[in-house]
Amino acid sequence: SQQGEEDPQALSIQEGENATMNCSYKTSINNLQWYRQNSGRGLVHLILIRSNEREKHSGRLRVTLDTSKKSSSLLITASRAADTASYFCATAGGFKTIFGAGTRLFVKA
Amino acid sequence: EAQVTQNPRYLITVTGKKLTVTCSQNMNHEYMSWYRQDPGLGLRQIYYSMNVEVTDKGDVPEGYKVSRKEKRNFPLILESPSPNQTSLYFCASSSRDRGPLSYGYTFGSGTRLTVV
């Protein structure tokens, strides 16, 4: 069963703009993670936010978590062409981690 | 370098011919998992292992087997591959130091399997 669902499915922006991706999920979680995947390669862990946290920053990344709405957002500020990739949210509850279908981000130089 | 190593990267095989995809991690992680990735479906978990000799089914275990005889290795076995198992496969590991998946996964580079 698919838990995390990202929105939008695809996003195209200009270099320097901010990119926002959203993730919704259905059941209770221990934490929520965001990953990046470049064109068929392995996923790279970006950031993890625990269920008792509301906001987290890492460099140009900002993640928020609203457990009452069962949703999270990933903001990439001042985007670069190198940020072009697919971004996945993953929800961890119990001993399973479930991934969404991802958002494809294209940053035009 | 801390990493998860999968082999092979690419594999083309015929229906019914048994194959094994190997996965090894050098981070002393307790938790390991296999996922398959298909267009439009994201990553779906096949099997996972909490520690040596402890494995459990994920969401799509049919047609697959795993074993965890050593902490570092977690091979994925397809006893009789079929064309619907054509996919991109990922192995991943994580530490359970502060509970399951407290630190997120480290992923391997993937194995692209084609069954004809």
Image: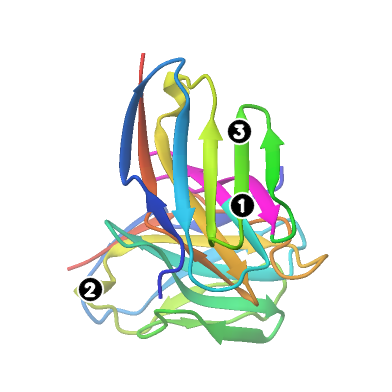
Residue B88 location (% of width, % of height): 35, 58
- The residue tagged 3 is A61
Q: Horizontal placement of A98 versus A52: left or right?
A: left
Vertical position of residue B54 compared to residue B39: above or below: below
Identify the chain of the residue marked 2, using the numbered disc in the image: B
Q: Dot 2, crowdedness within 10 Å: few (<14), some or many (≥20)?
A: few
Which is in the foreground here, disc 1 or disc 2? 1
Which part of the image, by quadrant, shows the C terminus of chain B?
A: bottom left
Residue located at (50% from left, 53% from top): A89
Label disc, if present, on residue B84 of the rendered structure: 2
- Amino acid type for the residue under numbered disc 3: Leu
Q: Is residue A40 magenta?
A: yes
Q: Secondary structure at mark 2?
A: helix
Picture coordinates of residue A106, whole percent (x, y): 34, 29
- Asked whether the residues under the numbered discs 1 and 2 touch, taking CB atoms below 8 Å apart as contact, a structural biologist would say no
Report the span colored magenta. A34-50
Majority SS type along the magenta span: strand
Q: Secondary structure at mark 1?
A: strand
Measure the alpha-carbon separation of dots 1 and 3.
13 Å
Q: Which residue is mark 1?
A: A65
Q: Nearer the viewer, mark 2 or mark 3?
A: 3
Give me the residue at 74% from left, 64% from top.
Answer: B29
Q: Chain of mark 3?
A: A
* Quarter of the image that includes the N terminus of chain B: top right
Q: How is the image coloured?
A: rainbow
Residue B4 in view (yes/no): no
Q: In which quarter of the view is residue A91 placed?
A: bottom right
Labelled disc at residue A44: none
Secondary structure type for disc 3: strand
Give the foreground label among 1 and 3.
1
Q: At 61% from the left edge and 45% from the top edge, which residue is drawn?
A: A64
